[in-house]
């Protein structure tokens, strides 16, 4: 088995953003975070003893996500990493990533993070540099704070930076606003970014407002234009569009994220976190109190059949520029391979996909349709 990635979920946020359906809670205090820390360590010990037979698994990558990890003091993470040392072997860890929101990133916080933890990659949740967008999305920070956060992160030593941006926010003029955001990104020379189209998730504030007719989603044509602009921007500015929502300058691809589409095992600690080890997928309850009460046994599990693994591989690999690799396909049963080749031939005939020497990929001009193309395989 390849060395696993380690994901740690921090489920605390200041308040819910208008579009967000991730699991997080907005009310917490020092007592709750202290018991959450203990629960994370208890779950880590459980993984080490029950799934790795006390053999201290070597960890390939670490990713602290949320929620809002930067809402907690650096001392939380120093204590967390110190505790995790007794369960896992980090000596070969090649990436330590941390999600942060601009409103928490003061110079002192960033310098402390750099000095007192092994974190060397920051993923900053900006969504936009435009105050009007940030207001609609109900984010806490301003465009100016977003720019300042990038500068302060660099001053503290972080060169491996990523930001999240969102498109498809407006019914009209969206393309002009999106171009402004991309220009700002180019000016700041950030080596990696994620770009997501705004989607409507049931139960969110945005969803309620759209249902009441008080807000409107951007039409498909607008989203298409903005996605094309993203592709053109990437070419002009030296970014590889290596996954449908992720773009990087050479050498800055996110290693941890690629674990998910390369079937590399991962351990997920924390409320709502998912794990994938061997052929088993498990996930923790998305309720803080329940998780803290019994972090090891609040899990649900399922064994993945070869068919499930084949589906998952094709779904995720089609989203990447590398595509579905012939060598990986060869590891699946003959019947899955045949089925794949038959469907891929149909998609190539429609002009949606192409065959390269090593793989099958979604054509660049059809990438926005990736999810719909992937569905035709199942
Ligand atoms: S800060 Fe992130 S996780 Fe928290 S509500 Fe906003 S988008 Fe969701």
Image (spheres, rainbow, N blue to C red):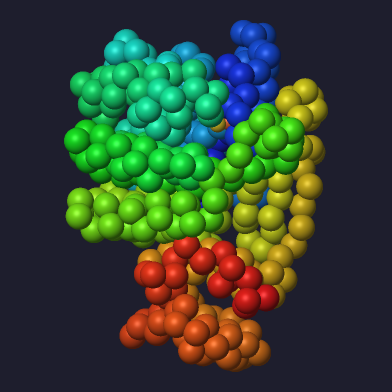
Q: Nearer the viewer, residue 8 or 202?
A: 202
The structure residue drawn at horizontal position 74% and vertical position 33%, both measured from the top left corner, is 212
The answer to which image quadrant residue 340 occupies is: bottom right
Q: Nearer the viewer, residue 281 or 355?
A: 355
As drawn, is 76 to the left or to the right of 143?
A: right
The answer to which image quadrant residue 154 occupies is: top left
Q: Looking at this view, name the residue that lies furthest to the top.
A: 30
Q: Split into 4 quadrants, where in the image is the C terminus?
A: bottom right
Q: Quadrant of ligand 1?
A: top right
The structure residue drawn at horizontal position 49% and vertical position 18%, both measured from the top left corner, is 140
Question: In the figure, 267 relative to 228: above or below?
Answer: above
Residue 101: image x %, image y %?
44, 24
The structure residue drawn at horizontal position 55% and vertical position 23%, both measured from the top left corner, is 138
As drawn, is 23 to the left or to the right of 155?
A: right
Residue 8: image x %, image y %?
56, 35
Residue 111: image x %, image y %?
29, 17
Residue 26: image x %, image y %?
65, 18
Residue 369 appearing in the image: yes
Q: Nearer the viewer, residue 211 or 74?
A: 211
């Amino acid at each position: 088995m390849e060395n696993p990635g380690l994901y740690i979920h921090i489920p605390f946020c200041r308040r819910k953003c208008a579009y967000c359906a991730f699991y997080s809670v907005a009310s917490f205090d020092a007592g709750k975070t202290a018991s959450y820390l203990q629960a994370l360590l208890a779950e880590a010990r459980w993984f080490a003893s029950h799934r790795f037979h006390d053999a201290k698994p070597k960890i390939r990558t670490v990713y602290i996500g949320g929620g809002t990890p930067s809402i907690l003091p650096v001392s939380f993470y120093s204590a967390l990493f110190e505790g995790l040392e007794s369960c896992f072997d980090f000596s070969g860890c090649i990436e330590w990533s941390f999600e942060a929101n601009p409103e928490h990133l003061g110079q002192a916080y960033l310098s402390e993070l750099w000095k007192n933890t092994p974190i060397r990659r920051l993923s900053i949740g900006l969504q936009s540099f435009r105050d009007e967008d940030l207001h609609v999305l109900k984010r806490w920070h301003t465009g100016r704070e977003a720019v300042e956060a990038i500068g302060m992160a660099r001053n503290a030593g972080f060169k491996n930076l990523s930001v999240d941006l969102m498109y498809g926010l407006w019914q009209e003029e969206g393309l002009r606003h999106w171009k402004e955001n991309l220009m700002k990104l180019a000016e700041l020379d950030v080596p990696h970014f994620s770009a997501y189209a705004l989607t409507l998730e049931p139960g969110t504030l945005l969803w309620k407002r759209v249902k009441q007719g008080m807000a409107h989603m951007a039409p498909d044509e607008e989203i298409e234009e903005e996605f094309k602009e993203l592709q053109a921007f990437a070419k002009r500015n030296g970014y590889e569009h290596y996954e449908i929502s992720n773009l990087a300058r050479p050498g800055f691809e996110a290693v941890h994220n690629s674990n998910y589409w390369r079937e590399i095992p991962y351990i997920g600690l924390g409320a709502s976190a998912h794990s994938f080890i061997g052929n088993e997928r498990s996930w923790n309850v998305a309720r803080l109190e329940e998780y803290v009460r019994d972090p090891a046994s609040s899990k649900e599990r399922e064994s993945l059949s070869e068919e499930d693994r084949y589906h998952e591989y094709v779904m995720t690999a089609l989203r990447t520029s590398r595509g579905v690799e012939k060598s990986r396909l060869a590891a699946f049963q003959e019947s899955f391979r045949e089925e794949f080749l038959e469907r891929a031939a149909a998609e190539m005939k429609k002009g949606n996909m192409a065959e390269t020497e090593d793989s099958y990929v979604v054509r660049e001009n059809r990438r926005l349709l990736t999810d719909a193309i992937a569905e035709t395989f199942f």
